[in-house]
Image (tube, grey):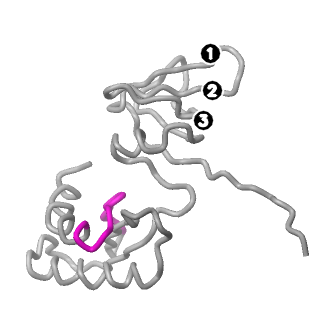
Amino acid sequence: MNSFADTIERIIGPSLEEMGFGIVRISFGGGNRKRLQIMIERLDDQNLSLDDCADVSRTVSALLDVEDPISENYVLEVSSPGIDRPLVKLKDYVRFQGSDIQLELNTLYEGRKRFSGRLASVDGEEITLELPEDGKPIVKFPYSDVQKAKVIPEISFKKTER
């Protein structure tokens, strides 16, 4: 995370946790119209509702109005991580062990930066990925070298009876 996101998380994190929400990611950017995106999830692992996002938005707005860490105009957006949830913090990798993920590295590893496979384990700050392709079935990366990563959604097409 960067220092800006750390500052915002320090301001809003405790209140959101008290409300039963965790912060997945904080981003700020855009061209002429800046956007502060707060991606949240429920701590009880239930689905996030529109009402949840509205409640969090009101709380975040009030907290940021008091602290005023952003000097320019911006639009606040509170959202869920969606089905292709980003993996941002090391604890995300621990939580999603056994899931299929895509990740992109900051540096080349054996000639490539992008990998898809099953997140086999997290040992300290080392991530082990099982690759479905031939050649090298297991690769290990330091967490610090991961630029971005996300869970690949599992989609089931079960036939339902009528």
Q: Residue furthest top?
A: 135
- Mark closest to the chain's N terminus, 1 or 2: 2
Question: Residue 10: percent from the left, percent from the top?
Answer: 15, 61
Which quadrant holds residue 117?
A: top right
| Segment colored magenta | 17-30
Using the numbered discs, state the Cα–Cα distance from disc 3 to disc 1 in whole angstroms. Answer: 13 Å
Q: In this orientation, which residue lies closer to the viewer: 156 or 6?
A: 156
Magenta span has 27? yes
- Main SS, magenta residues: strand
Q: Residue furthest right?
A: 162
Which quadrant holds residue 159?
A: bottom right
Using the numbered discs, state the Cα–Cα distance from disc 1 to disc 2 in whole angstroms. Answer: 7 Å
* CB contact under 8 Å: marks 1 and 2: yes
Residue corresponding to mark 3: 116
* CB contact under 8 Å: marks 3 and 2: yes
Question: Residue 137: percent from the left, percent from the top?
Answer: 63, 18
Residue corresponding to mark 2: 131
Identify the mark at residue 39; answer none if there is no mark: none
Magenta span has 45? no
Query: Mark 3: few, some, or many residues within 10 Å (few <14, many ≥20)?
Result: some
Q: In this orientation, which residue lies closer to the viewer: 47 or 131?
A: 47
> As drawn, is 37 to the left or to the right of 18?
right
Residue corresponding to mark 1: 136
Please, is residue 79 above or below residue 50 in the view?
A: above
